[in-house]
Image: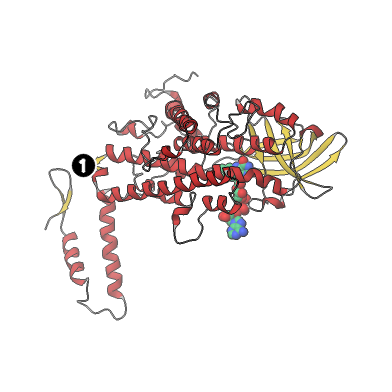
Amino acid sequence: MTISSVNKAGIPEEEMSSKLGLPSLDMSLAFPQATPASQFPPPASDYYQLDDLLNPEEIEIRRKVRALMEKEIAPIMTKYWEKAEFPFTAIPKLASIGVAGGTIKGYGCPGLSLLGSAIATAEVARVDASCSTFILVHSSLAMLTIAMCGSEEQKQRYLPSLAQLRTVACWALTEPDNGSDASSLKTTATQVNGGWVLNGQKRWIGNSTFADILIVFARNTATNQINGFIVKKGAPGLNVTKIENKIGLRIVQNGDILMNKVFVPEEDKLPGVTCFQDTSKVLAVSRVMVAWQPIGISMGVYDICLRYLKERKQFGAPLAAFQLNQEKLVRMLGNIQGMLLVGWRLCKLYESGKMTPGQASLGKVYPQTSSPLFATTKIFPLVLRAGLDFADGQGNGSPSARAHGRERNPRRFLSRQGLLRSGADLLLRRHLRHQQPGHRPGDHGDRQLQARRSRLSKPALMNSRGRLYISS
Ligand SMILES: Cc1cc2nc3c(=O)[nH]c(=O)nc-3n(C[C@H](O)[C@H](O)[C@H](O)COP(=O)(O)OP(=O)(O)OC[C@H]3O[C@@H](n4cnc5c(N)ncnc54)[C@H](O)[C@@H]3O)c2cc1C
């Protein structure tokens, strides 16, 4: 079957979900006034003009990545998300912008500044979170480990083709029994004649189902320290199975890895990984990139929500005209500015050699301080939640819903039904207060309760503009 074939309903086959035989969710199908989801909206979230903080090279990389993601990647991602498949056709497109390898200098890598690499991560994530995870694992974990901990010979052998995405890498640290507690990993590496034998399991490893090389961390049975190895796809004893039925990051191919006496030649042992602290050096950089991922996703969610609220009209006006929605947009926009500034500062601290692990972690997680503006991944849900408030029937399956990884309509804040339900909630709350010990009839609220009860007992009518009102 060719990509352009159409079914009985006249819908191109590529837009059909493989599992259900239904078209991919796109609100423009049922709501023609909306711009199709494949056309990504222009950026509107850089309210404080972050561009002024970038050098010309960083501005150029932002422009290049943004153009590719909006024009070439956005149109194809929905169907892959529906099928939870990886878009291999996107790999040459991503290769063309030259971001794989990020900050690595030489060996055909782009040698970007940390901020330039972070901006590229955010621009990819703005359009597709899964796509940015693919690049993060390949570039900021696997390639960086080779660059920081590999021998000169290993760098020359592996980095050039990884930089051009002719080969893809994954990074295997997590195990079924050791996630957050990664330094307790149990996979073993035993030295034998001419190399090492690996035994153990890894779990959740992104890109692993198709990666050409796997960076694997294992415990040296002689020293009890963590060492790193480059394992090649198809090595005897290596078995990778895709983890199915994920809700979030559906395009990312996470794998369960089983290693049963996998032989790794001495030349593929990473000389720079002699203990767990060596992986921490790589994680310090990747943490900065991970902090920029939710920044990018939040920017995209904001852009999509803004366009939707301008296009969708209810009660005779665009939804953006209602202050209830404007307030949510303002909160999203404000949070994004805070996230951008924290991300920018993290890069500057790292580049000046001053960034501490704590500062990197603070950028990623909520610091339990009074101001939530200092965290990116914890602020991110606030932006998403506000975005989800707009994800009504039309927005279901939108990037904000996709970014949150939910498939069903989350809430219908603005529907007529929703407004009536909140009226009913109010009545219930007041009724419960009425039941409380010590409550005297005639206390504050009772008169409003009476008035409301009598209004709601009358029939609801539509006015000429389709608005619901209660006859009084
Ligand atoms: C989409 C995706 C891609 C991934 N890609 C990779 C990859 O490429 N390579 C790789 O090596 N790994 C990868 N991982 C694994 C990831 O790094 C782990 O999921 C993460 O380290 C957490 O480990 P865990 O899932 O085993 O959860 P656990 O560590 O078991 O945690 C379970 C819960 O307990 C909580 N918890 C843990 N420790 C504490 C504590 N001390 N106090 C209080 N609560 C605690 C956690 O917050 C969490 O809610 C990926 C995961 C996902 C979901």
Q: How is the image coloured?
A: secondary structure
Q: Is residue 445 above or below residue 192?
A: below
Left or right: 8 in relation to 174: left
Residue 251 visible within the image: no
Q: Nearer the viewer, residue 244 or 32?
A: 32
Left or right: 397 in relation to 189: left
Instruction: Please identify the residue farthest to the bottom as the structure is shown.
Output: 438
Picture coordinates of residue 137, whole percent (x, y): 60, 38
- Three-letter residue code for mark 1: Ala
Determine which quarter of the picture holds residue 173.
top right
Determine which quarter of the picture holds residue 265.
top right
Left or right: 275 in relation to 169: right
**Quadrant of the drawing holding the C terminus:** bottom left
Q: State how many labels appear.
A: 1
Picture coordinates of residue 41, whole percent (x, y): 36, 33
Q: Nearer the viewer, residue 425 or 444?
A: 444
Picture coordinates of residue 244, whole percent (x, y): 57, 40
Q: Is residue 119 above or below residue 353?
A: above
Residue 193 visible within the image: yes
Q: Residues within 10 Å of mark 1 (few under 14, many from 20)?
A: few
Picture coordinates of residue 116, whole percent (x, y): 52, 35
Q: Residue at x 25, y 59 (%)?
A: 423
Instruction: Please identify the residue farthest to the right as the structure is shown.
Output: 193
Asked whether mark 1 lies closer than 8 Å to ligand 1, one says no
Say which element carries label 1.
strand
Which residue matches tag 1? Answer: 317
Q: Nearer the viewer, residue 210 or 166?
A: 166
